[in-house]
Image (cartoon, rainbow, N blue to C red):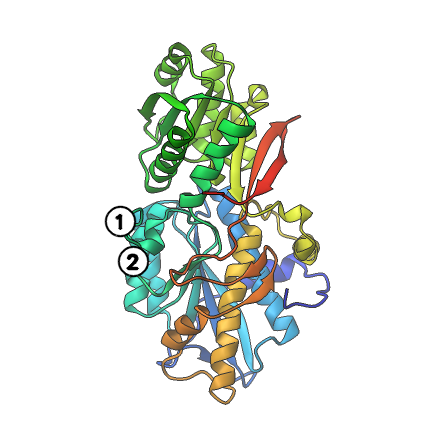
């Protein structure tokens, strides 16, 4: 990681940085601060800060805040001070699009971290791309975002301003299928999804690989993500003879679904992707969640030597919410933008050029550094070159890593 020791950051400073209003509106981007004589660059954050998925969104916001403060403390970019402005998309595409428009309008914003949801990203990409404003997601996993809607046959990058530090469902779904079939020895699976971009896509890649391995999909079902009553689906699972359930979706629905499947008499594990890898899943699923599984991007942050400083500094920062499943990736997403700003400033005699946004987007393509989550760089599609994934199981009321690796397709 390109960071040195960071002294404790107080909670008061943390709160203060997040309530700053939008900075100036110079055409060149950034705010020429008269008090400091330097330039202020704003990094936007878009995530669900309220609602069911806020446990993940707040961890993203806090981690970007920590990256900005670290860069300022280290004077990573000479003459530049970083601030963040965080916007709440409530996991809704329409809100995400409105947020994207607002962030584009603020000329001090030279990069954006987020969003959490792939469906929200779909609504934001063109807005950012038209403005040549770089966007780096720590959590989006739908392959179409970087490789086009026909990615399974012909990969074509739709937006050059979009990047992500998380790997894709083209890898995550098959990785889960291999674990379920080869390691968990489950040969009959019932597949359920929430009909949303992320969930349906993940269920699709899992199903394809599971069948290829020789497994049988004994039933499929789509649920309403606004519902909490899944008793009818649970009964279908019970009568299907399934040995496991694969769910494409997120934890607010996955927890009750798991609980109701067990209550219906099907004492089988529910498996999902990174969207269910949250402590709230266990709270919602209850005591019968033991044995349920989730895959998530990368390796457990707590076990990475590269993440020790991040974990310590996050704790010292006094943030009220956990960094969660995507904190390390959010930090690295922000740091990719910071590295790109540094490159552009260094190449322009220590100041931001008039076309800062376009040049920062171009520079992001070539960033490469040792981050919290490991080596951070991007391929020709804007996808993370780090393809590692981990399987977690619920044991004694907590997630425990059981296997890490990469998809061997």
Question: Residue at image x 61%, y 63%?
Answer: 370
In this view, 23 is above or below 141: below
Is disc 1 placed on a helix, strand or loop? loop
How far across and how far down the image is residue 262, in percent?
Answer: 49, 15
Task: Please give left or right for residue 74 compared with residue 134 in the image.
Answer: right
How far across and how far down the image is residue 75, in percent?
Answer: 62, 76
**Picture quadrant of residue 189:** top left
Upstream in sequence: badge 2 or badge 1:
1
Local crowd at mark 2 within 10 Å, few (<14), some, or many (≥20)?
A: some
The residue under label 2 is: 156
How far across and how far down the image is residue 203, in percent?
Answer: 37, 34
Q: Which numbered marker is on residue 165?
A: none
Closer to the camera, 285 or 371? 371
**Picture quadrant of residue 362:** bottom left
Question: Residue at image x 59%, y 23%?
Answer: 290
Rendered-image quadrant of the N terminus: bottom right
Local crowd at mark 1 within 10 Å, few (<14), some, or many (≥20)?
A: few
**Rounded to the nearest whole Å, what is the CA distance between mark 2 and mark 1?**
8 Å
Task: Please give left or right for residue 292 compared with residue 105 in the image.
Answer: right
The residue under label 1 is: 150
In this view, 82 is above or below 58: below
Q: Mark yes or no: residue 136 visible.
A: yes
In this view, 277 is above or below 214: below
Is disc 2 placed on a helix, strand or loop? loop
Q: Which residue extends farthest bottom?
A: 349
Question: Residue at image x 43%, y 67%?
Answer: 111
Question: Residue at image x 49%, y 40%?
Answer: 274
Asked if the residue at tag 1 contacts the one at tag 2, i.e. Cβ–Cβ closer than 8 Å, the answer is: yes
How far across and how far down the image is residue 212, in percent?
Answer: 38, 32
In this view, 49 is above or below 232: below
């Amino acid at each position: 990681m390109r960071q040195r020791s960071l002294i404790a950051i107080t909670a008061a400073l943390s709160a203060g940085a997040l309530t700053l209003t939008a900075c100036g509106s110079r055409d060149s981007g950034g705010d020429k601060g008269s008090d400091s004589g330097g330039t202020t660059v704003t990094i936007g954050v878009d995530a669900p800060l309220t609602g069911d998925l806020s446990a993940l969104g707040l961890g993203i916001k806090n981690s970007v805040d920590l990256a900005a403060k670290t860069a300022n403390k280290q004077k990573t970019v000479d003459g530049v001070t970083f601030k963040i402005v965080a916007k709440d998309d409530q996991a809704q595409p329409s809100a995400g699009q409105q947020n994207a428009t607002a962030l584009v309008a603020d000329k001090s914003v030279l990069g954006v971290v987020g969003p959490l949801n792939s469906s929200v990203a779909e609504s934001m990409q063109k807005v950012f791309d038209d403005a040549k404003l770089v966007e780096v997601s720590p959590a989006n996993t739908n392959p179409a975002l970087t490789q086009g809607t026909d990615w399974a046959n012909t990969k074509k990058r739709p937006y050059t301003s979009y990047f992500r530090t998380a790997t894709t469902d083209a890898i995550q779904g098959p990785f889960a299928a291999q674990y379920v079939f080869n390691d968990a020895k489950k040969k009959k699976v019932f597949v359920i999804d929430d009909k949303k971009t992320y969930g349906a896509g993940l269920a699709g890649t899992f199903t394809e690989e599971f069948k290829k391995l020789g497994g049988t999909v004994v039933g499929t079902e789509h649920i309403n993500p606004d519902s909490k009553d899944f008793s009818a689906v649970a009964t279908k699972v019970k009568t299907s003879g399934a040995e496991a359930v694969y769910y494409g979706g997120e934890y607010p629905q996955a927890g009750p679904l798991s609980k109701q499947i067990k209550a219906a008499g099907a004492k089988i594990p529910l498996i999902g992707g990174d969207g269910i890898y949250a402590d709230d899943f266990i709270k919602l699923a209850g005591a019968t969640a033991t044995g349920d599984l989730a895959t998530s991007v990368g390796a457990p942050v707590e076990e990475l030597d590269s993440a020790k400083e991040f974990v310590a500094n996050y704790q010292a920062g006094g943030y009220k919410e956990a960094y969660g499943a995507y904190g390390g990736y959010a930090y690295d997403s922000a740091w990719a933008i910071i590295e790109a700003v540094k490159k552009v400033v260094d190449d322009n005699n220590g100041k931001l050029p008039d076309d800062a946004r376009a040049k920062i987007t171009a520079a992001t393509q070539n960033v490469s550094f040792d981050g919290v989550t490991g080596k951070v760089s991007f391929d020709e599609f804007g996808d993370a070159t780090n393809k590692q994934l981990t399987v977690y199981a619920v044991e004694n009321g907590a997630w425990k890593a059981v296997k890490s690796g990469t998809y061997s397709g």
